[in-house]
Image: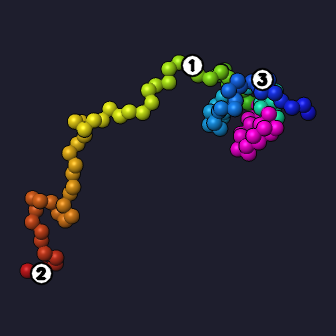
Amino acid sequence: MSPTDHDELPLPDYDHLSAGELEHRIRSLSEGDVERLIRYEREHADRAHVVTLLTARLRQLEAGSPQSPGSTQPPTGPRGEPGGSPVTPATSPQPYHPPPHGTPDQAARPKGNRF
């Protein structure tokens, strides 16, 4: 078995994908492509959860599971603005500290039949 080169991988950004992203991106790969990723993973990082994920997908393909029409390329376009909340001090509610027993409108009552 010859070492798998990074340039031969079907996913150009494979080394930067999390397991969650990888799970969705491998749906459009063929059996040969998944086998190539398994070989590359075992030769390099050898992350157990990624090998398990890839092996499970390979078994699905061998059992006749169809390939997804999705793309192996990373998504393009703007990524939204990082952080920031539309809440400002002007739009925040006033702090509310309820009394420990009852409400201010109701007088406390003695327990039981004590007077």
Q: Residue at x 27, y 35 (%)?
A: 88
Q: Earlier in the sequence, mark 3 or mark 1?
A: 3
> Disc 3 and disc 1: Cα gap in Å?
21 Å
Residue 7, picture quadrant:
top right
Residue beneath disc 2:
114
Q: Dot 1: within a 10 Å radius of its alpha carbon, few (fewer than 14), some, or many (20 or more) residues?
A: few
Determine the secondary structure under disc 2: loop
> Disc 3 and disc 2: Cα gap in Å?
85 Å
Q: Which residues are magenta?
A: 40-63
Disc 3 vs disc 1: which is toward the camera?
3
Q: Amino acid at mark 3?
A: Asp
* Left or right placement of residue 82 versus residue 54 in this view: left
Residue 67 visible to the viewer: no
Residue 104, picture quadrant:
bottom left
Q: Dot 2: within a 10 Å radius of its alpha carbon, few (fewer than 14), some, or many (20 or more) residues?
A: few
Determine the secondary structure under disc 3: helix
Q: Residue at x 8, y 80 (%)?
A: 115
Residue beneath disc 1:
76
